[in-house]
Image (cartoon, helix red, strand yellow):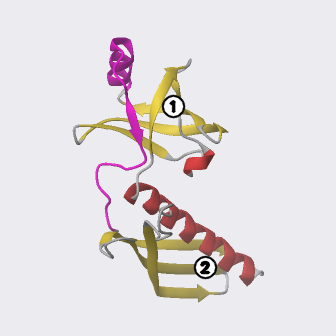
Amino acid sequence: LFNDQDGTPDYRLEGIITTAELNTGIDSNCYIKAKVSIIDGKTGKKIATKSCRGNNLDLFVTDMGKLRANTIADLMTQIYKFVMQAIPVTGNIQKALNNNQYLVNMGEAHGLTPGLPLYIIEDGKYKAELKVKEITGSESCICKISNGQSYVEKCLQNGTPLVVTTKSKKIKDD
């Protein structure tokens, strides 16, 4: 992300691969571990650090390139989830749909993908969790409540705005 005024990045992602293994044979596997940090672009201070892992196991694999590519894709998914927690994207529940599903004003433009968890945190306390079911546009998605249904229903009945975020209660290092 960039600040429009001076072109300085708001955040910087840094990392180092700490382990990389490729084992071939009957049980071929590939494993990559990286230590990743998010740095505030203005202050240079670390916001968060996490060890992320990519792992892929395949029986009788013959294409080592595909095994490595799948492992890298797994690692990138772990890094993506870490970034989405460390630099939260926020939005609101726009309206209730049927079957415990809700329309949220965040979508493809915010980096959301199906299966991504979203959280409702009020006054620093965890209140509910949703899962992105479907991306319906660049600024919208449909989510299903994983837990906290009664809290969400009560807030919507009272007209209380619900802020939804990608950041969970705490980022845990593995």
Q: Is residue 96 above or below residue 121?
A: above
Residue 91 occupies which quadrant of the picture? top left
Residue 168 location (% of width, % of height): 35, 49
Q: Nearer the viewer, residue 6 or 56?
A: 6
Which residue in the structure is indicated by mark 2?
29
Residue 22 magenta: no
Q: Amino acid at mark 1?
A: Lys
Q: Amino acid at mark 2?
A: Asn
Q: Is residue 97 above or below residue 53?
A: above
Between the C-alphas of marks 2 and 1, the distance is: 35 Å
Q: Which residues are magenta?
A: 149-173
Q: Secondary structure at mark 2?
A: strand
16 vs 170, left or right, is right
Which residue in the structure is indicated by mark 1?
144
Residue 172 magenta: yes
Residue 59 seen in the figure: no
Q: Is residue 12 above or below residue 19?
A: above
Quadrant where the C terminus sits is bottom left
Q: Residue at x 67, y 81 (%)?
A: 26
Residue 120 occupies which quadrant of the picture? top left
Residue 98 location (% of width, % of height): 56, 17
